[in-house]
């Protein structure tokens, strides 16, 4: 869920209708014959050795290094966006030899721009195209993937949720846990006419917030973005559609889990100290005067919550455009860029790819930001946390001594 958008102009609506008409066509258009189909050979020859950069010598690994995905997953992504990229006019999208860019080369340009975060000029030079071509290609790709790959990021159905809960309990001992939540800042520069206190965050950066909930495989199952970085993380949560659905008992409303001594446990997610303690969002105990069982609970909670932290580390490490300072981005388009990067993150997981080991960021995904703290405590949330604490302690006591 993003902030309400302004109504589109008549021109934009007209273009949108044209795009929808193209998308609804039954057959996939064929690409022009005179296309740049040998893009990888020329790209590899030009970029296989870069001073000061260690690039894998194996071409398969090098491909993943440059574009974050295997060739098999790359082909899958091309299949998703092919109809949209072919059916729309090329608008002069040609290389220096005068050939139309193939769908594969367009996808490669867009992925490289998102993966590296390098300037459009630099990305264009590595492919033999101009800055404007990189800009056009990347945005067309983002529009297409946002529409065609949306099923890769959705709230799980009941069967899938039971699988997620089972894996969380097996891995961490938390019954009925449905996910972990965290948030991060996307830093940007803004022209003077667009600057305001809303967009200036706690570290005096202009930024946009992203809230994400992940499952046991660090796949994003809910994303909220578009809101200004001047908001607190807890405020972002309360502005989200996810919060409203949970409060209306329309989400995290699955099977109740019966524990020992007749205690029942509803579905919930875990979050850090920046979040309020709610019946469906469990936060850790404050780190003062902790009992042994509270310390144990906090350790288990932290291990579970770290899945969301690691997911954002992979997201911003894999798609470095989100980790670099955005130069005067269009704040209406930036949420689409963020969402597509999240979709790509999930596609990598869904296709069984492994990120190159050097990709994931080290440290924290919000480096330089101090931890926020929310003091809001709901009485039912407190009871939920205490019941989880007792459950962990009960299981620890009955476990056979090693």
Image (tube, helix red, strand yellow):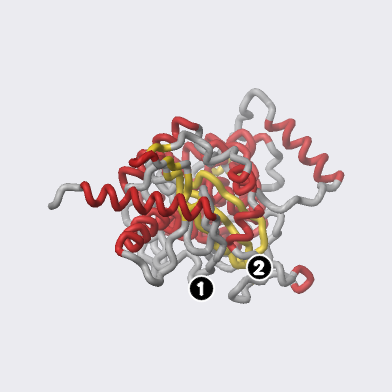
Q: Residues within 10 Å of mark 2 (few under 14, many from 20)?
A: many
- The image's mark for residue 370 is 1
Q: Earlier in the sequence, mark 1 or mark 2?
A: 2
Dot 2: element = loop
Q: Position of residue 256 (x, y in %)?
A: 45, 36
Q: Position of residue 47 (x, y in %)?
A: 44, 59
Closer to us: 49 or 17: 17
For residue 402, say whether it is visible. Answer: yes
Q: Residue furthest top?
A: 26
Q: Residue at x 67, y 71 (%)?
A: 200
Q: Residues within 10 Å of mark 1 (few under 14, many from 20)?
A: few
Q: Position of residue 31 (x, y in %)?
A: 60, 34
Q: Residue furthest left?
A: 402
Q: Quadrant of residue 176?
A: top left
Dot 1: element = loop
Q: Is residue 153 left or right of residue 313?
A: right
Considering only vertical position in the picture, is 268 above or below 255? below
Q: Residue furthest front?
A: 261
Q: Position of residue 316 (x, y in %)?
A: 49, 59
Q: CA distance from mark 1 to mark 2?
A: 14 Å
Judging by the rendered image, the residue that carries numbered circle 2 is 230
Q: Residue at x 32, y 51 (%)?
A: 392
Q: Residue at x 55, y 36 (%)?
A: 151
Q: Quadrant of residue 299?
A: bottom left
């Amino acid at each position: 869920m993003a902030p309400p958008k302004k109504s589109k102009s008549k021109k934009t609506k007209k273009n949108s209708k044209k795009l929808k008409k193209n998308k609804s066509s039954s057959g996939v258009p064929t690409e022009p014959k005179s296309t740049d189909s040998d893009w990888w050979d020329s790209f590899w020859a030009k970029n296989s050795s870069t001073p000061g950069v260690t690039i894998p010598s194996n071409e398969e690994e090098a491909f993943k290094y440059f574009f974050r995905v295997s060739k098999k997953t790359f082909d899958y992504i091309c299949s998703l966006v092919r109809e949209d990229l072919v059916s729309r006019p090329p608008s002069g999208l040609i290389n220096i030899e005068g050939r139309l860019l193939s769908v594969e080369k367009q996808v490669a340009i867009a992925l490289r721009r998102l993966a590296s975060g390098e300037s459009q000029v630099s990305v264009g030079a590595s492919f033999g195209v101009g800055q404007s071509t990189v800009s056009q290609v990347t945005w067309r790709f983002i529009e297409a993937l946002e529409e065609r790959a949306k099923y890769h990021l959705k709230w799980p159905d009941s069967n899938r949720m039971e699988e997620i809960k089972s894996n969380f309990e097996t891995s961490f001992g938390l019954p009925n846990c449905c996910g972990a939540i965290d948030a991060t800042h996307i830093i940007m520069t803004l022209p003077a006419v667009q600057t305001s206190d809303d967009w200036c965050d706690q570290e005096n950066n202009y930024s946009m917030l992203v809230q994400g909930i992940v499952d046991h495989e660090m796949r994003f199952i809910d994303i909220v973005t578009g809101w200004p970085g001047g908001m607190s993380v807890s405020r972002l949560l309360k502005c989200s559609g996810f919060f409203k659905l949970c409060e209306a008992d329309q989400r995290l409303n699955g099977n109740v889990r019966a524990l020992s001594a007749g205690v029942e446990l509803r579905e919930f997610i875990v979050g850090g100290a920046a979040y309020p303690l709610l019946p469906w969002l469990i936060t850790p105990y404050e780190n003062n005067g902790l009992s042994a069982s509270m310390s144990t609970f906090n350790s288990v909670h932290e291990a579970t919550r770290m899945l969301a932290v690691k997911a954002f580390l992979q997201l911003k490490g894999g798609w470095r455009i989100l980790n670099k300072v955005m130069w005067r981005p269009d704040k209406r388009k930036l949420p689409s860029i963020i969402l597509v990067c999240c979709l790509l993150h999930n596609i990598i997981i869904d296709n069984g790819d492994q990120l190159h080991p050097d990709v994931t960021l080290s440290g924290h995904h919000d480096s330089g930001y101090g931890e926020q703290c929310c003091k809001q405590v709901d009485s039912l949330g407190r009871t939920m946390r205490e019941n989880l604490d007792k459950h962990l302690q009960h299981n620890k006591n009955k476990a056979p001594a090693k």
